[in-house]
Image: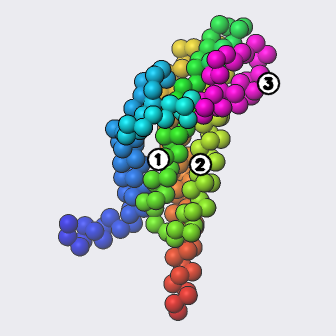
Amino acid sequence: MNQSALHTLQPYEGIIRFVVAMLAANYFWKFTVLGDEHGYGAVTWLGMDLTWYFNQMADHIAGVVYTMLSWFDSTVTLTDGNHLRFVSTGIGTSIVWGCTGIKQSFIWLIIMLAARGRWLDKLWYIPVGWLFAYAFNIFRIFMVALLTRNHPEWFELLHTYLFKYMFYGMFFLLWWYYDERIAVRSKKSEVSDYE
């Protein structure tokens, strides 16, 4: 690439880093974490069996969502640790390993490792992103369950498209705040230290 092209791309360096890191993390996950998409069977990473950990997280998420759903519908039940069902409508869903938010937390970690800025700032901001990922994942599953209680035909739209892209939109906003406010402020303070 010539200097002119590099100069033209300079304002987009952060966004390019974000997109490349997100895609690289996503594909790395897809090729190294193996397990049935429907949550049955083992989950492995590079040959190590992580099924127990993913199942524990799925059961935890299901328990939290069950508690929240019971505030809105007293007929909701939780069985086998991760199966939610509305007795009033007969509609149910299972919280499986793919619903744990662990993949999204891994992607956030890679995005932040690739971001510009001081490591000290990243050290505290990565867990902030994980907290947002955890809270949004709970909200996402809660909303999908609540909205599909009377409209099961909405499941694919809500689960596969709407909330999935909202998840990555949230990551983009968190990254943008970091890149525009925290990383830039750190860079300005480093420059002023040398002046």
Q: Which residue is mark 3?
A: 71
Q: Quadrant location of the N terminus?
A: bottom left
Q: Amino acid at mark 2?
A: Trp
Which residue lies under the disc numbered 1? 107
Q: In the image, which residues are magenta?
A: 56-82
Q: Is residue 169 magenta?
A: no
CA distance separating discs 2 and 1: 10 Å
Three-letter amino acid code of the residue under disc 1:
Ile
Kind of residue indicated by mark 3:
Trp
SS at circle 3: loop
**Is label 2 in a helix, a strand or a loop?**
helix
Residue projecting furthest to the bottom: 195
Considering only vertical position in the picture, is 42 above or below 19? above
Q: Can you tell which mark lies on residue 130?
A: 2
Q: Callout 1: 10 Å neighbours few (<14), some, many (20+)?
A: many
SS label for mark 1:
helix
Q: Does residue 75 sit above or below 187 in this rendering?
A: above
> Residue 144's x, y, as percent?
60, 25
Examine the image and state in which quarter residue 70 appears: top right
Residue visible at 62% across and 54% down?
Answer: 128
| Disc 2 crowd, CA 10 A, few/some/many (<14, 14-19, 20+) | some
Identify which residue is drawn at 55% across, 31% down: 52
| Residue 41 x %, y % | 46, 22
Going from N to C along the chain, the mark reached first, 1 or 3, is: 3
